[in-house]
Image: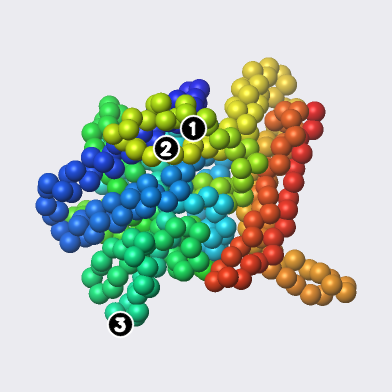
């Protein structure tokens, strides 16, 4: 794995912002080919404008951590956790972008996930009163109106995601940029496979006419959606358990401002490096294990590597005889952290869950590294 640097993360954020500017320019001069393409452009521009207006936070996740927090198909996705995201409208960037086979299934074409924007979303049905708030962004859709909010606004009933992907040719050279808007309903708890089924049903694909080709396309597109959402949702769950004190480092704002041209971003942004202490420790640990002599490998075979345990809800027994139950939120934590170094590290923090003004209980899980 290449060495990840701060400049790499800044360059990736700049690449995403430049792509958004180019897309806005294309939208202004090239007519969309379908109503759904028009709506996707509207959503994309509204989400990026919201980010520029509110928050302007960038979270660069270390590549080793990205690999650790991917979800499996059978993993539960309790979307209510996303209300506890302790950042406002963050743009998440991947300094070493994950690569997937393209959903189009054309030759060896691939897609590279540069990052994604986030927001809160609420749909208003026909006849439903709209909020009298001119500061909120809105996107008009057929039969209803969709409003975009900050991720901290409890009025939102969905979590919005705008992915930014590079299309790669057979030589892994970028040939295009693709923007996709997705939403996750708050309050549900499905497996990743069930979540992908719902997204695929709502996603507007360019379907082939031939039935056999369509069946093949269905398999390929679902695999692409599953791999993409495995990274995105896993990253979001990890971020819901981090704060500015837990393996999160603010990059010097002046340093960032000097490297992001004014033509790309007029107002300064805040960039945080997330998981870089843990990620670097994982890199060192795995490199050291790779250097172990073959004769000693058997001694290590029964040992477990450091692993990330994701945030989740659980019913905790309490009271007389542990007969009562209360819903708690367990923050994420790392196992076997003593193998990662000698520095103390709190990998999780209490996360208050707020839904319509009601705060849920949380628990704090603190893990200290041993020498």
Q: Which residue is mark 1?
A: 253
Whether residue 190 is visible to the viewer of this picture, yes or no, is no
For the residues carrying marks 2 and 3, which lies nearer the camera in this image? 2
- Between residue 334 and residue 241, name the one nearer to us: 241
Q: Which residue is mark 3?
A: 127
Mark 1 vs 2, N-terminal side? 1
- Between residue 162 and residue 341, name the one nearer to us: 162
Mark 1–mark 3 distance (CA, rounded to whole Å): 46 Å
Question: Residue at the right extreme?
Answer: 321
Mark 2 vs 3, N-terminal side? 3
Q: Residue sitting at 63 percent across and 24 percent down? A: 284
Mark 1–mark 2 distance (CA, rounded to whole Å): 7 Å
Q: Is residue 142 left or right of residue 250?
A: left
Q: Residues within 10 Å of mark 1 (few under 14, many from 20)?
A: few
Point out residue 91 in the picture as x, y percentages from the top left corner: 43, 45
Q: Which residue is mark 2?
A: 268
Residue 345 badge: none
Mark 2–mark 3 distance (CA, rounded to whole Å): 40 Å
């Amino acid at each position: 794995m290449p060495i990840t640097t701060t400049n790499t993360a800044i360059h990736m954020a700049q690449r995403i912002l430049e792509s958004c500017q180019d897309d806005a320019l294309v939208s202004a001069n090239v007519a969309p080919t379908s109503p759904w393409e028009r709506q996707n452009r509207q959503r994309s521009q509204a989400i990026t404008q919201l980010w520029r207006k509110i928050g302007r936070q960038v979270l660069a996740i270390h590549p080793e951590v990205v690999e650790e927090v991917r979800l499996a198909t059978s993993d539960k996705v309790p979307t209510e956790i996303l209300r506890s995201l302790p950042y406002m409208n963050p743009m998440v960037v991947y300094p070493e972008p994950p690569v997937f086979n393209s959903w189009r299934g054309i030759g060896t074409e691939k897609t590279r996930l540069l990052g994604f924007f986030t927001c809160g979303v609420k749909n208003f049905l026909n006849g439903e009163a709209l909020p009298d708030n001119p500061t909120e962004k809105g996107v008009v859709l057929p039969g209803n109106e969709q409003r975009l909010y900050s991720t901290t606004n409890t009025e939102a009933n969905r979590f919005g995601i705008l992915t930014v992907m590079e299309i790669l040719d057979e030589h892994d050279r970028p040939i295009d940029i693709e923007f996709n808007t997705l939403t996750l309903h708050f309050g549900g708890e499905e497996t990743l496979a069930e979540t992908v089924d719902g997204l695929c049903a709502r996603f507007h694909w360019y379907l082939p006419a031939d039935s056999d080709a369509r069946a093949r396309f269905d398999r390929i597109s679902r695999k692409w959606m599953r791999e993409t959402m495995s990274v995105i949702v896993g990253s979001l769950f990890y971020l819901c358990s981090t704060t500015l004190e837990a393996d999160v480092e603010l990059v010097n704002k002046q340093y960032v401002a000097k490297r992001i041209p004014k033509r790309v971003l007029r107002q300064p942004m805040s960039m945080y490096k997330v998981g870089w202490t843990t990620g670097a420790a994982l890199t060192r640990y795995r490199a050291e294990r790779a250097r172990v002599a073959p004769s000693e490998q058997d001694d290590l075979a029964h040992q477990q590597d450091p692993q990330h345990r994701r945030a989740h809800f659980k019913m905790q027994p309490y009271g007389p005889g542990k007969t009562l139950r209360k819903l708690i939120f367990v923050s994420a934590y790392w196992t076997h952290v003593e193998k990662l170094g000698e520095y103390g590290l709190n990998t999780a923090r209490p996360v208050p869950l707020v839904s319509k003004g009601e705060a849920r209980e949380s628990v704090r899980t603190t893990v200290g590294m041993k020498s």
